[in-house]
Image: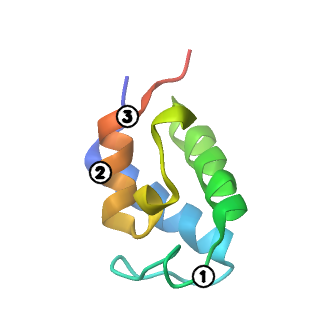
Amino acid sequence: MMPDHNAIRSAARKAASAVARRPVKDSQRLVTSGLIDSLSVLKLISLLETTLNISIPPETLQPEDFDDIDLIVETIERVAKPAP
């Protein structure tokens, strides 16, 4: 079962802050500002998969899909599947 919107948003905030190593605001640009790099995006995806018990297919993603909290939530709701 997929987590609800609020659970995804909360997990996205926590994961983004952990990867950036500082608090992150919902509208704050993560990738385009240089706050996190492409390797950090992979760490972010891994954290989200573990936290939310989901699978995110990497072949469908671009780093820009994780540029702010709203985009992270939108991306997860669009492509994620429950973990097996």
Q: Position of residue 46 (x, y in %)?
A: 65, 45
Q: Specify whether residue 56 is in view.
A: no
Name the residue rendered at 40%, 70% in the picture: 68
Q: Looking at the picture, which amino acid does disc 2 mark?
A: Glu
CB-based contact (under 8 Å), mark 1 and mark 2 = no
Q: Position of residue 38 (x, y in %)?
A: 65, 62
- Image height check: is 11 above or below 58? below
- Image height check: is 2 above or below 43? above
Query: Which of the two discs, 3 and 1, labels the residue nearer the N terminus?
Result: 1
Task: Residue under label 3, please give it.
Answer: 79
Name the residue rendered at 59%, 82% in the picture: 34
Task: Residue under label 2, please give it.
Answer: 74
Distance from Cα at disc 2 to Cα at disc 3: 9 Å
Query: Which of the two discs, 2 and 3, labels the residue nearer the N terminus?
Result: 2
Query: Which of the two discs, 1 and 2, labels the residue nearer the N terminus?
Result: 1
How packed is label 3: few (under 14 Cα within 10 Å), some, or many (20 or more)?
A: some
CB-based contact (under 8 Å), mark 2 and mark 3 = no
Task: Residue under label 1, please give it.
Answer: 35
Horizontal relation, residue 36 to residue 6: left or right: right
